[in-house]
Amino acid sequence: MTQTFTASEDSVASARRVLTLEGDALKHMADDLPVDFAAAVDCILACKGRVIVSGIGKSGHIGRKIAATFASTGTPSYFVHATEASHGDLGMISKGDVCLLISNSGETTELRDIVYHTQRFSIPMIGISSNPNSTLMQAADFRLTLPKLPEACSIGMAPTTSTTLTLGMGDALAVALMDQRHFASEEFGVFHPGGKLGAQMRTVADLMHGGDDLPLLDEDARMQDVLLAMTSKGFGIGVVVKDGKLSGVITDGDLRRNMDGLMDQTAIGIANRNPLTVGPECLAPEALGILNDRKLNVLVIVEAGAPVGVLHIHDLLRAGVA
């Protein structure tokens, strides 16, 4: 017999307390952003190299996430481990870069060599800490001081509120930079080609069938040729053209509706002369929505009046768009 475990009232109360404390802390920081925030954003925007993020312990874990968020949203960035920096990885930090160093106390000794390196080579340095009078913040060119608020853990020592605030500050920087750069969804898709997110950002041009796969037919094509093209290409449609431009589309339904005297017809005689089409820039989820709404299986992709591809609903499903 399977035993069912449920969270106790104490556990639920603890979770709510933690989330409330951390949520209140973020609201506090939003209401009183560091004075240097806008200047730090401008510094990163002017950066010709990369944003180098570093920290130790929990600050390091948060730093890795911040660097990854920057990199995926148009701000070239990577994480350098502070200890490894002292053993050769300082070579990864060069003029033209900006350093973002994280230490809640501001006294993390492992960051010392990176701080010296930035000063030696005049590399701009942004500090994130809750201690404005710390060694790190005194050395920083831009100070993003976090509000000094209690940690959410019951003993007040485990990094919880402080790491949440640091992560929030990193997200705030990344989004502010996106907005300043007018970073578009198409650019976001370039950095996220894999998984569900990648599929959602793909266009029909990425998934369509073109070239010799197109079931193209002249307007005066005989019905034998129409049936052969529709069968051999495997999409269940014929794309009728005149002088390279789309003039109609034939579906299985058009064949059934014209059974009487069908073999005496030409392609344009039974084609739908006002078919539903999309451009190659149409996003895949939008194309899927069109197919579902119109109860269609295939879309014809048209550019400058000419058919350039066909897209079957199965292509979208295989790509993980649904």
Image (cartoon, helix red, strand yellow):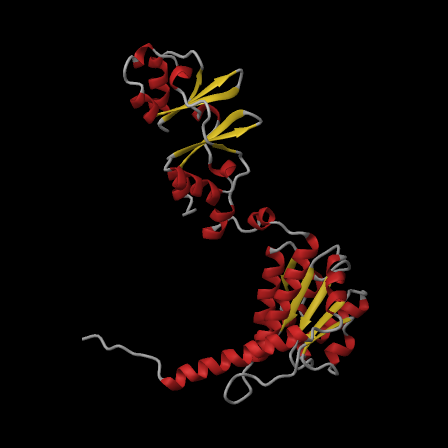
State the quadrant of the N terminus.
Answer: bottom left
| Residue 44 percent across, percent down from the top left | 73, 60
The image quadrant that residue 172 belongs to is: bottom right
Seen from the viewer's position, the closer of residues 154 and 274 is 274
Q: Where is residue 203 in the image (x, y as percent from the top left)?
A: 51, 41
- Of 20 and 144, nearer the camera is 20
Extreme residue toward the top, this view: 264
User: Image height check: is 169 above or below 247?
Assistant: below
Is residue 21 shown to the viewer in this render? yes
Q: Where is residue 194 drawn, in percent x and y?
A: 49, 50
Q: Would residue 84 be visible to someone looking at this image?
A: no
Identify which residue is drawn at 48% across, 48% down. Answer: 200
Depth check: give the residue in front, 311 or 57: 311
Report the residue that reaches farthest toward the left. Answer: 1
In the displayed structure image, the side of residue 254 where residue 108 appears, left or right? right
Residue at image location 73% in from the left, 82% down from the top: 134
Q: In the rendered image of this protein, does residue 235 appear above or below residue 167?
A: above
Q: In which quarter of the image is residue 231?
A: top left
Identity of the residue drawn at 37% across and 35% down = 297
Q: In this view, does 218 lie above or below 234?
A: above
Disc tally is 0
Q: Position of residue 249 (x, y in %)?
A: 42, 24
